[in-house]
Image: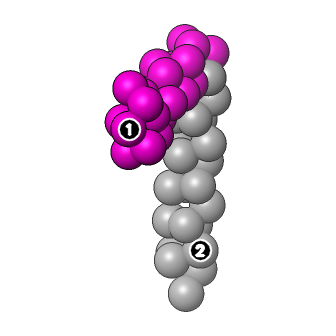
Amino acid sequence: MKNNTKTKILLGAIGVSFIAIGLYQGGYNDILQKAIRICLECIGIG
């Protein structure tokens, strides 16, 4: 049981660090622009 908890904490820490690295590199701008284009295409504007 203790090993399972350690694994969950380790994977959570890795996930948070990857999110922080992505934010630091400005990856959210790319994702936001792609999401805007997809939404505009669905509506039929873009």
> Which quadrant is home to the N terminus?
bottom right
Q: Is residue 27 above or below residue 35?
A: above
| Alpha carbon distance from label 2 to label 1 | 48 Å
Q: Position of residue 14 (x, y in %)?
A: 53, 44
Residue 26 in the magenta stretch? The answer is: yes
Q: Can the viewer see residue 38 in this picture?
A: no
**Circle 2 SS class:** helix
Pair 2/1: label in front: 1
Q: Which residue is mark 2?
A: 5
Q: Position of residue 35 (x, y in %)?
A: 47, 35
Q: Which residue is rendered at x = 49% and y = 22% of the image?
A: 33
Q: Is residue 1 above or below residue 18?
A: below
Q: Residue furthest front?
A: 45
Q: Which residue is mark 1?
A: 44
Q: Position of residue 24 (x, y in %)?
A: 62, 15
Identify which amino acid the numbered label 1 is placed on.
Gly
Q: Which residue is rendered at x = 53% and y = 46% of the image?
A: 15
Residue 42, by quadrant, is top left
